[in-house]
C-alpha cells in the first residue's frame, strides 16, 4: 500500500458482508490509521524508488465502525468503476504520457547536441536514430490523441467512455515503456548513468504495467465491457 504507515486513513476493500456474496461483490471501507489490529509488514524497497513508503498491511481481528462504510455493502464495483476509475485512470494516463514526452524531449535534445570528435559526425544525422525519433514521436502523439478522445467521451458521458478510458491508460503505459526504452538506446552510455533522468523515467514507466489496474487487466476489462460480458 502506497504511503503505508504514514497516512491518517486507508481505503480498503473487503468481501461483502454475507457468505452468499457473489465474486466481485466487494465493499469499500475507510480504515482509520489508529484502528487496533493493523500490522504493517516490512517496508517494500521498489525498483530505484526514493522517498516512497509502500508496504503490506495485515489486518487481525480489525473492527470497523458502520459509519466508515463507503456507500452501501457490496457496491464497491459501482464505486470503483463509476466514481474512482474514470478520474484515477485519466490521471495515470496523463502521468505516463508525461513520462513518455519527457523521455522524447531529452532524446531529441541529446541527439541535437552529440557529435563525434574529430569527424564532427552528429547523432542527429544518423538515419537509424532519425527513424527511432519518428517512431517515438508517433507513439506519443497517438497516445495523446487517444487520451484526449477518452476525456471527451468521459465529459460527454458517452456509453463507451469507460472502456475507452481504460484503453487510454493502458496505451499511455505501453507508450511510456516503449519510448523510455528506446530513449535509453538512443542516448547511449550517458543514459545508463545510475539515477540519471532517463533511468528514472524508465523505472517510473515500468511501474505502469503492474500498478493496479494493470495494463493487461485493463485491456481485458475494456473488451468485456465492449462485448457486453460481465466485468469480473
Ligand atoms: C509502485 C507501486 C505502487 C503500488 N501501490 C499500491 C497501493 O497503493 N495500493 C495497493 O493496493 N496496491 C499497490 N500496488 C500493488 C499493485 O496493486 C499490484 O502490484 C497489482 O495489483 C498487481 O498485483 P500483483 O503484484 O499481485 O501481480 P499479479 O496479480 O501476480 O499479476 C502478475 C501479472 O499477471 C497479469 N494478470 C493477473 N491477472 C490477470 C487477468 N485476470 N487478466 C490478465 N492479466 C492478468 C497482471 O497484469 C500482471 O502483469 C503498488 C504496486 C507498485 C509497483
Image (tube, rainbow, N blue to C red):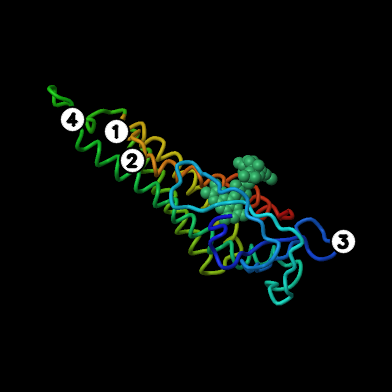
Coordinates of residue 112 in the picture (x, y in percent): 21, 38
Q: Depth check: 176 or 7 in front?
A: 7
User: Which label's residue is closer to the chain start, 1 or 4?
Assistant: 4
Residue 212 makes an appearance in the image: no
Q: Which residue is mark 3?
A: 20
Of labels 1 and 3, the one closer to you: 1
Q: Which residue is mark 4?
A: 115
SS class, disc 4: loop
Q: Depth check: 122 or 58 in front?
A: 58
* Few, some or many residues within 10 Å of mark 3 (<14, 14–19, 20+): few
- Mark 2: C-beta under 8 Å from nearest atom of ligand 1: no
Q: Depth check: 151 or 74 in front?
A: 74
Q: CA distance from mark 4 to mark 3?
A: 69 Å
Relative to 223, is 209 on the left or the right? left
Q: Which residue is mark 1?
A: 190
> Are the residues flagged by discs 4 and 2 in contact, CB closer than 8 Å?
no
Relative to 106, is 48 on the left or the right? right
User: Which label's residue is closer to the chain start, 4 or 2?
Assistant: 4
Relative to 161, is 102 on the left or the right? left
Q: Residue at x 19, y 37 (%)?
A: 113
SS class, disc 3: loop
User: Which label's residue is closer to the chain start, 4 or 3?
Assistant: 3
Of labels 4 and 3, the one closer to you: 3
Residue lying at the far right of the rendered structure: 20
Q: Residue at x 29, y 43 (%)?
A: 106
Coordinates of residue 153 in the picture (x, y in percent): 52, 63
The label number, if any, that marks residue 196 in the structure image:
2
Coordinates of residue 215 in the picture (x, y in percent): 57, 46
- Mark 4: C-beta under 8 Å from nearest atom of ligand 1: no
Amino acid at each position: 500500500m502506497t504511503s503505508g504507515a504514514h497516512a491518517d486513513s486507508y481505503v480498503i476493500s473487503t468481501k461483502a458482508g454475507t457468505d452468499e456474496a457473489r465474486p466481485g461483490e466487494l465493499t469499500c471501507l475507510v480504515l482509520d490509521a489508529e484502528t487496533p489490529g493493523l500490522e504493517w509488514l516490512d517496508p517494500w524497497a521498489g525498483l530505484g524508488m526514493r522517498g516512497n513508503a509502500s508496504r503490506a498491511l495485515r489486518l487481525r481481528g480489525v473492527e470497523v465502525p458502520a459509519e466508515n462504510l463507503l456507500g452501501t455493502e457490496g457496491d464497491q464495483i459501482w464505486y470503483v468503476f463509476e466514481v474512482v476509475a474514470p478520474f484515477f485512470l485519466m490521471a495515470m494516463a496523463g502521468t505516463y504520457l508525461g513520462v513518455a514526452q519527457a523521455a522524447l524531449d531529452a532524446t531529441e535534445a541529446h541527439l541535437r547536441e552529440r557529435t563525434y570528435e574529430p569527424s564532427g559526425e552528429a547523432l542527429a544525422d544518423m538515419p537509424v536514430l532519425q527513424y527511432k525519433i519518428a517512431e517515438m514521436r508517433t507513439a506519443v502523439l497517438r497516445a495523446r490523441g487517444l487520451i484526449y478522445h477518452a476525456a471527451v467521451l468521459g465529459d460527454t458521458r458517452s456509453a463507451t467512455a469507460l472502456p475507452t478510458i481504460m484503453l487510454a491508460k493502458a496505451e499511455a503505459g505501453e507508450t511510456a515503456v516503449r519510448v523510455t526504452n528506446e530513449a535509453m538506446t538512443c542516448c547511449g552510455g550517458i543514459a545508463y548513468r545510475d539515477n540519471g533522468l532517463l533511468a528514472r523515467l524508465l523505472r517510473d514507466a515500468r511501474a505502469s504495467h503492474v500498478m493496479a489496474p494493470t495494463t493487461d487487466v485493463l485491456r481485458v476489462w475494456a473488451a468485456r465491457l465492449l462485448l457486453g460480458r460481465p466485468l469480473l
